[in-house]
Each structure stands twice: as C-alpha cells, then as structure tokens.
Amino acid sequence: MWIRSTMAYRVSFVMTAFGGAVVTGLDFVAILLMFSRVDTLGGYALPEVALLYGLSATSFGCADLVIGSAGRLGTRVRDGTLDTLLVRPAPVLAQVAADRFALRRVGRITQGLLILGYALVALDVGWTPLKVLLVPVMVVCGGVIFSAVFVAGAAFQFLAQDASEVQSAFTYGGQTMLQYPPTVFGRELVRGVTFVFPLAFVNWVPASYVLGRPYPLGLPEWAAFAPPLVAVACWALAGLAWRAGLRSYRSTGS
C-alpha cells in the first residue's frame, strides 16, 4: 500500500530519493575534504576508507529500508495504537516494518553502492575468489546485523516508550562510526563494538582480510569469516528481546 502510494507521484519519489542520496553523500564529501589535507587517515588510504564507507552505507541502507520504520514503535506504545496491530492476522514485527514504508530510502543504498563500486575499482589489492565472495557476504550480513540492532532498539521502546534517539545512537551512530578506520578510535570503543555490540563484523573485521590489514584487537584470521555466525546470533538475541518486549506490553490502560 505504501509503495503504491509513493509511486503515485513518481517525480516526487525520484526527487526525494535523489535528495536523500545527496544528503547522505555529504558524509563522504567530508572524508574527501579530510584527504585533501592528509594522505592517509589512521593509516588507511582513500580507496580503503571508501571501501569501509561503501560497505557500512550499503548494509545500513538495506536495513533502514526493510526495518527502519521500527524506530517509531515508541509512539505506538505511548498512544496505544499498537493494539490495532495485535488484532490483525499477521506478525506484529512485519506490520511494524511495513508501517509507513519509505521506498525513498533506496537513495541511501544507491549512494553507498556507488562509493563501494569506486572503492573496488580503485583498490590495489590482490583479489582472490574468496575475497571477491566476501564483499557481498559483508553487505548481506551487515544488513542483517543492523536490522537486529533496529529490532532490539524497538524492543527497548516497549519499556522506555520514548527511546528512538537512543536507538538512533546505535544505528545511525554506529553506521557513521564504521565509515572510518578502527585505528582512529580508542581501544575500549573498538572492544565495545566488537564484543558487546558486534558492529565491527559489518566491515572492520572482514575488510581487514580483504585489505591485508592487521585485525582489530589482534583477532585471529578466521574472524573475518565470522559475520554470518554473528548475524545469526544477533538476530536470535534481537528476536528474544522482541518477544519479551511484546509480552510485556499492556496498552495504555484507557
């Protein structure tokens, strides 16, 4: 329904999607401005940073398109309109994801893919079949990991009710952090996004294998191939959190 509504005004959709791509692309413009003054950033050259940027932007864009609407769950919990989703013969999470589905978010995905394409062409690495295969695996698993963070944040809103900004700190904030090399951040922060909120497996860890870089925190080489396992674990935990939050929902009492 929301897609048909959006495509009823196709020129508006194209302009909105293009505008979104331009706005999100300003992040990479900031990186280009940095490289106009320095040759490397945290020891990483521009094509290497572009790879990290493209992977995180594309992965996050896919998650934002599919499940980004979950950020508004707190509003439904506060005003009790979540009740209407509970009585429908469809999974509540699917309805939350489809609520006001914003097809214009494909602009973020397109912009991320363009930067990723540039990085893959500009990188000077010895490509092997395993490295080539790892690139789409990173995009898919990264999208799943970000989606799990969206769902976990939505589950937290059952308790906090007005925690969309807290959720954004880990979703939008996490995506922005992953655009930069892990070497520019403190060791404690890198440890937190590796072992507590495993966002590092979106691009930092597997990209280290592709680029031939030292692994963050001295992780073993097999960690580069762990994103599928991490993605499954994140979704399992997010699913448990969602079920617990949904069971705790008691409406508004009115």
Image (cartoon, rainbow, N blue to C red):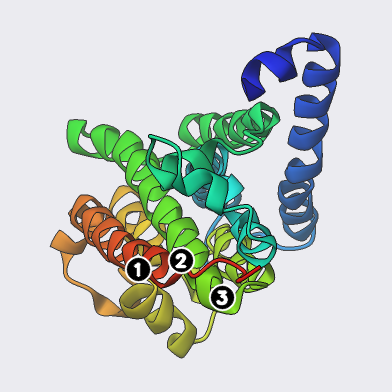
- What kind of residue is marked 3? Val
The answer to whether the residues at label 2 and label 1 have Cβ atoms under 8 Å apart is yes
Q: Residue at x 44, y 89 (%)?
A: 188
The quadrant where residue 171 appears: bottom right
**SS at circle 1:** helix
Instruction: State the residue at coordinates (30%, 69%).
Output: 215
* Image position of 42 with respect to 81: above or below: below
Q: Position of residue 105 (x, y in %)?
A: 66, 34
Between residue 156 and residue 64, name the one nearer to us.
156
Q: Of tags 2 and 3, which is closer to the observer?
A: 2
Task: Classify mark 2: residues with Cα within 10 Å, few (<14), some (14-19) or many (20+).
Answer: many
Q: Position of residue 44 (x, y in %)?
A: 52, 60
Left or right of 55? Residue 225 is left
Looking at the image, the residue that sits furthest to the bottom is 188
User: 67 or 95: nearer the eye?
Assistant: 95
**Sequence order check, earlier mark of 2 and 1:** 2
Q: Position of residue 155 (x, y in %)?
A: 46, 66
Label 1 packing within 10 angstroms: few (<14), some (14-19), many (20+)? some
Q: Name the amino acid type tagged 1.
A: Ala
Proximity of marks 2 and 3: CB atoms separated by less than 8 Å:
no
Q: Which residue is mark 2?
A: 155
Residue at image point 57% right, 53% down: 82
The residue under label 3 is: 184
Q: Report which quarter residue 187 is drawn in.
A: bottom left
Q: Hey, which quadrant is residue 7 in on the image?
A: top right
Q: Residue at x 73, y 19 (%)?
A: 6
Q: Amino acid at mark 2?
A: Ala
Along the horizontal axis of the image, is 78 left or right of 205?
A: right
**Residue wearing tag 1:** 241
Q: Quadrant of the N terminus?
A: top right
